[in-house]
Amino acid sequence: MALDWKVVIDCADPHAQTAFWAQALGYQVEDNSALIEQLVGQGVLSEDLYLEVDGRKAFRDLAAVRHPDDPVQPVSGTGLGRRLLFQRVPERKQGKNRLHLDLHAGPERRDGEVKRLEGLGATILREVQEPGTHHVVLADPEGNEFCVQ
């Protein structure tokens, strides 16, 4: 039986990361406000664990983006398909990622996508042109590497 999954990325500011990645991928920031209201109403979530972002209640230390075409759990607002979850951690990123995302724009769109991502806050780290590949390695606003092919 196949398993559902999500990619979890440690970060300093999950809401800034979801803002970047929602724009980068054309994804939607998950709306967990209904779940937060339910947990507050049950007395299991204190005020210090959530905040308001773009007029909605959001978990302080967790935020996610999801593919707009994938199903969503109505009670929680959690995506049930392709998604990235950003979780706040106290330590800063150190060293190279062991896992990264490859964004497939295609050769005709690659340069335009790289420029667009730079405009959103990404930084170009290097361009790689080797037999069989031509891609650009970038870093998101917190330094997490990803590639555009």
Image (cartoon, grey):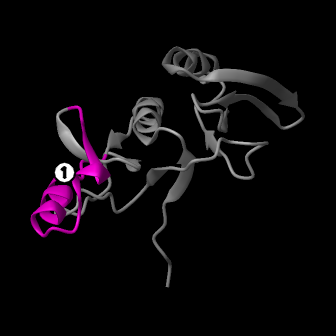
Residue matched to label 1: 33
Give left or right: position of 71 versus 115.
left
Within 10 angstroms of label 1, few (less than 14), some, or many (20 or more) residues?
A: many
- Residue projecting furthest to the left: 41
Give left or right: position of 5 versus 131.
left
Q: Residue at x 32, y 57 (%)?
A: 79
Residue 99 spot, x, y in % from top left: 70, 52
Whether residue 74 can be seen here: yes
Residue 92 spot, x, y in % from top left: 65, 41
Residue 100 spot, x, y in % from top left: 67, 46
Q: Nearer the viewer, residue 107 or 95?
A: 95
Give left or right: position of 56 versus 130.
left
Of helix, strand and loop, which one carries label 1?
Answer: helix
* In the depicted structure, whether residue 142 falls above or below residue 68: above
Whether residue 66 can be seen here: no
Q: Residue at x 20, y 57 (%)?
A: 36
Q: Amino acid at mark 1?
A: Ser
The C terminus is located in which quarter?
top right
Magenta range is 30-54
Q: Residue at x 34, y 63 (%)?
A: 80
Taking the magenta stretch, the answer to whether it contains residue 120 is no
Q: Nearer the viewer, residue 36 or 23?
A: 36
